[in-house]
Image (cartoon, rainbow, N blue to C red):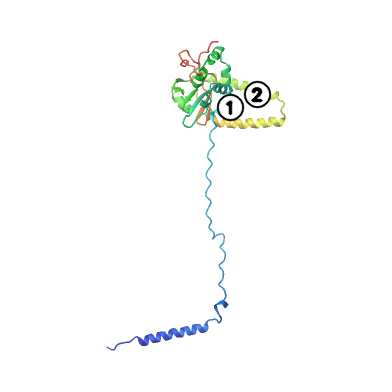
Amino acid sequence: MPMITLQPIRTIALASVAALLTVACANAPSGTLEELPPLPAEPPATAAEIHEPEPEPEPEPEPEPAPLMIDLLRQSGLHSELLAASERAELLDLLSPTEEQPRTLLAPTDAAFAALSKRELRRLDRPGELAAQIRRHVLEGALDPAALAAATEVLTIDGEALPIVALAPEAANDASGDDKADAAENADATENAAEGSDADADADADADADADADADAEEQTTAQAPSLAIAGLTLGPVIESRYGRIYVVDALIPASKSGKTSKTSKTGKTSKTSK
């Protein structure tokens, strides 16, 4: 079988490539590279093509904390005597509970202090008696109405047990009627003071607006406590405070000679102290 050599094929291929290069050079435009037209510039990116990072959503603002207990007492207009007595006894810190030491306050009104007999006032003037009386109104923990309704007694910060009694409907209605009478009396006093004021109409309008704002704020923090009595004191409205609760009461916890609370009657009222 005769051998086929690749030399003629390789020669023919090289000749074909050379011919193609010659034709290409002949058809190419004359001139140097500098004379060739510039390449077209890329078009600017459109807004749709620009991908900017989306802004992160702003965090939701945290709810404002409830007012401090001592500030609520100052704003109430009903507890100036309690604040003054606490200051005299150097116990204002008890009216400022903390997250570590939440407290509940049975807050006697100014009317409760005004109703004290001369004998009780003399007792409170004795060394240590005023402080002991105030401390008996401060309970351990921030006790809500549901917790009180389910309990039979509560402990003061000194460990004294105070009995809880559910009021009969008649007693609850009597307490409600007393509250309404006090509210009407306060309203009459406010009206008389307004009539005697020399403030102009603009000042009155501003005062009304402030009163409306205060009423709205009080509505958010004030609720009616269940029909209960603690150590003979009928619980009034409950006010939410920071790290605690305030229950408005219309009397002071009576003290017996043994240092224990007096027993509560079935109606939830204590016997009156003789003058």
| Residue corresponding to mark 1 | 74
Q: CA distance from mark 1 to mark 2?
A: 18 Å
Q: Note whether residue 32 is visible.
A: yes
Label 2 secondary element: helix
Within the image, what quadrant is residue 18 found in? bottom left
Relative height, residue 94 to residue 19 (above, below): above
Q: Residue furthest left?
A: 1
- Could you classify mark 2 by the number of other residues whose Cα lies within 10 Å: few (under 14), some (14-19), or many (20 or more)? few
* First in residue order: circle 1 vs circle 2: 1
- Could you classify mark 1 by the number of other residues whose Cα lies within 10 Å: few (under 14), some (14-19), or many (20 or more)? few
Within the image, what quadrant is residue 32 found in? bottom right
| Residue corresponding to mark 2 | 190
Q: Inspect the image, locate mark 2, and give the three-letter code of the amino acid beneath it.
A: Thr
Instruction: Give left or right: position of 216 versus 269.
Output: right
Q: Note whether residue 169 is visible.
A: no
Relative height, residue 55 to residue 144 (above, below): below
| Viewer-proximal residue among 242 and 215 | 242
Relative height, residue 259 to residue 22 (above, below): above
Q: Inspect the image, locate mark 1, and give the three-letter code of the amino acid beneath it.
A: Arg
| Marks 1 & 2, CB-CB < 8 Å contact | no
Q: Position of residue 140 (x, y in %)?
A: 46, 26
Q: Position of residue 105 (x, y in %)?
A: 51, 25
Q: Residue at x 62, y 20 (%)?
A: 185
Q: Nearer the viewer, mark 1 or mark 2?
A: 1
Label 1 secondary element: helix
| Viewer-proximal residue among 198 and 271 | 198
